[in-house]
Image (tube, helix red, strand yellow):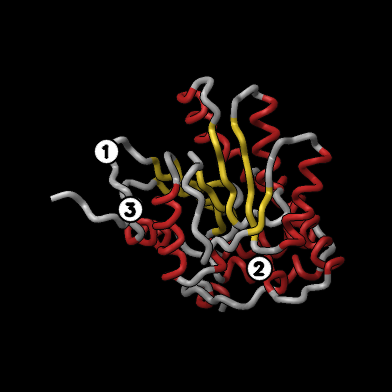
Amino acid sequence: MLLQSLAQRNRQPEWMDQPGIDPLAHSQALQGLRRINAFSGAVGSLFAPIRSLAREHGDQPLRVLDLACGGGDNTTALAERARREGLAIQVDGSDLSPQAVAIATKNAAEQALSTRFFQADALNDPLPDDYDVILCSLFLHHLDEEQAVDLLRRMGRASRCLVLVNDLIRSPLGYGLAWAGCRLLSRSPIVHFDGPVSVQGAFQLQEVRALAARSGLEGAAVQRSWPERYLLSWRRSLASPQLGMPQPQ
């Protein structure tokens, strides 16, 4: 029955996305997600291409924007890695939730990071066009196909160099890992519910590749990563036109 239910996406409302969520429950859920993000190693897969790009830039600072960053766990972890390796990388984050932005800002200040967080709607607000890298993590599975295509297209259009997307893979293994991991690493009922539901709403690898093609991210690489996640990466070449812009005749 599970195999059959995972054959197609099953998007359900997640508790953390509900308006009017209790601030304490929200904070506890974000703490749980912080532990899960640390365990997943997603930051490592995101940081590898950012590191390579930063080394190409030399002493010129690289600007990175983490969309829909939630509590900023990946954002601050990326900034901390850059600091530890002595790389000139400025990592910022944006999120729709003012509470998430406040929590992320506090955490960054406690780590003495220069990371800046600001409130923005990734789906409806214009994306800043002064970042070299635009990424999102665990956000695409919240969207329907048209929203996902539009976001990827806008990320490719706004980013100066690189687009990165890290998210869940819809599979029995992914579902089992989410169910067990969320209960082992968090006491939050929100996390216990949202984790498996997120996998049910996630994309499979061939679906991600199709979304990238539809959005104009030609040549995007989609690779499987631990734990049953994928990393989509797209690099703008010097000859790449602005996505969605009319081409010269």
Count the numbered circles shown.
Answer: 3
What kind of residue is marked 2? Pro
Q: Position of residue 4 (x, y in %)?
A: 50, 77
Rendering coords of residue 244 (x, y %): 31, 57
Pointer 1 local density, CA inside 10 Å: few below 14, some 14–19, many at least 20: few
Q: Can you name the residue that lies furthest to the right here?
A: 24
Q: Residue at x 61, y 57 (%)?
A: 68
Taking 47 as reference, is 163 left or right? left
Q: Which residue is mark 2?
A: 196
Residue 9 location, x and y as percent? 50, 73
On residue 243, the disc is 3
Q: Is residue 199 above or below residue 209?
A: below
Tag 3: amino acid: Leu
* Residue 24 position by quadrant: bottom right
Which residue lies under the disc numbered 1? 239
Q: Quadrant of residue 79?
A: top right
Query: Is any part of residue 52 visible from this angle?
Result: yes
Helix, strand or loop for disc 3 = loop
SS class of the residue under badge 1? loop
Are dots 3 and 2 in contact, CB under 8 Å? no
Q: Residue at x 56, y 41 (%)?
A: 64
Labelled disc at residue 109: none
Secondary structure beneath label 2: helix
Q: Earlier in the sequence, mark 3 or mark 2?
A: 2
Q: CA distance from mark 1 to mark 2?
A: 41 Å
The mark closer to the camera, 3 or 2, is 3
Distance Cα–Cα, label 1 vs label 3: 12 Å
For marks 1 and 2, give the one nearer the viewer. 1
